[in-house]
């Protein structure tokens, strides 16, 4: 069944902020681990509630120049909008711990979301880093795609140009857009892994 194997364990961990083992990384081709997080508006969002739809997970840190590359250029917002037009759910996740770069309150996230024109479905706050560690998210941005059946089908960078230079975007292969197009066409994802690049996720110590 969709997501069922890990619903209980991670839901409990997320609720109480317990440490998550670093070897809990998700495997491509396996059912993605379920989770619950609070979004910037204080609403609880659960991954499994989107069953039947593809889902993109995007790790975010507003202070990271690699993130700025994709937002200042509009590339991330365009990718988000194109995905959502195809019925994809896009979850932007901030795992920055309090006192570290990238940390935001709900109101700060709301302001940024509006100012930068985010097109994601939800902006989620993972202050304890529980979900980030469960997915072994290493960088911002670090991207994951879960297909409609609940399987993780892609993890890695947003594209194949691991720089902070906006000029590189035009020549880049957008791995996320390409994978979503393949899924829509009923094909297997041809590039299921790539090297994530960006700033390290600033987890709680």
Image: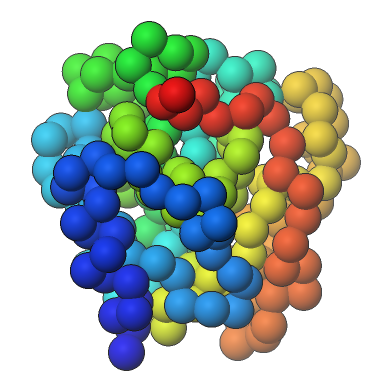
Q: 27 or 91, which lies in front?
A: 27
Left or right: where 2 falls relative to 95 = left
Looking at the image, is 185 positioned above or below residue 9?
below
Q: Residue at x 82, y 46 (%)?
A: 160
Q: Position of residue 58 (x, y in %)?
A: 50, 45
Task: Return the x and y of residue 99 as percentages of the image width and height.
Answer: 38, 10
Location of residue 52 with respect to 129 vertically, above or below: below
Q: Residue furthest top?
A: 99
Q: How many marks?
A: 0
Q: Is residue 71 above or below residue 7?
A: above
Residue 173 at x, y percent in the picture: 80, 51
Which residue appears at 83% of the width and 38% of the height? Answer: 161
Q: Which residue appears at 15% of the width and 33% of the height?
A: 41
Quadrant location of residue 38? top left
Q: Is residue 146 visible?
A: yes
Q: Residue at x 53, y 49 (%)?
A: 22
Relative to 139, 20 lies left or right: left
Is 185 or 189 nearer to us in this picture? Answer: 189
157 shown above or below 205: below
Asked if residue 83 shows in the view, the reply is no
Question: Which image quadrant: the N terminus?
Answer: bottom left
Residue 182 in percent (x, y) is at 66, 75
For the C terminus, which image quadrant? Answer: top left
Name the image colouring.
Answer: rainbow
Give the image quarter of residue 50: bottom left
């Amino acid at each position: 069944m969709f997501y069922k194997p890990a619903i209980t364990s991670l839901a409990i961990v997320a609720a109480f902020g317990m440490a998550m083992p670093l070897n809990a990384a998700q495997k491509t081709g396996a059912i993605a681990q379920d989770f619950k997080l609070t979004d910037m508006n204080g609403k609880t969002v659960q991954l499994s509630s989107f069953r039947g739809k593809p889902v993109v997970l995007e790790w975010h840190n507003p202070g990271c120049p690699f993130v700025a590359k994709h937002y200042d250029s509009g590339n991330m917002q365009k990718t988000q909008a194109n995905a959502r037009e195809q019925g994809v759910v896009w979850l932007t996740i901030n795992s920055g711990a309090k006192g570290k770069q990238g940390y935001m309150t709900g109101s700060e996230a709301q302001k940024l979301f509006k100012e930068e024109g985010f097109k994601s479905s939800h902006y989620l706050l993972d202050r304890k880093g529980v979900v980030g560690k469960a997915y072994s998210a290493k960088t911002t941005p670090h991207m994951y795609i879960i297909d409609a059946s609940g399987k993780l089908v892609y993890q890695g960078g947003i594209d194949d140009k691991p720089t902070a230079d906006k000029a590189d975007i035009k020549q880049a292969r957008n791995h996320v857009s390409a994978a979503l197009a393949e899924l829509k066409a009923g094909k297997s994802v041809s590039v299921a892994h790539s090297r994530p690049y960006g700033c390290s996720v600033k987890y709680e110590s």
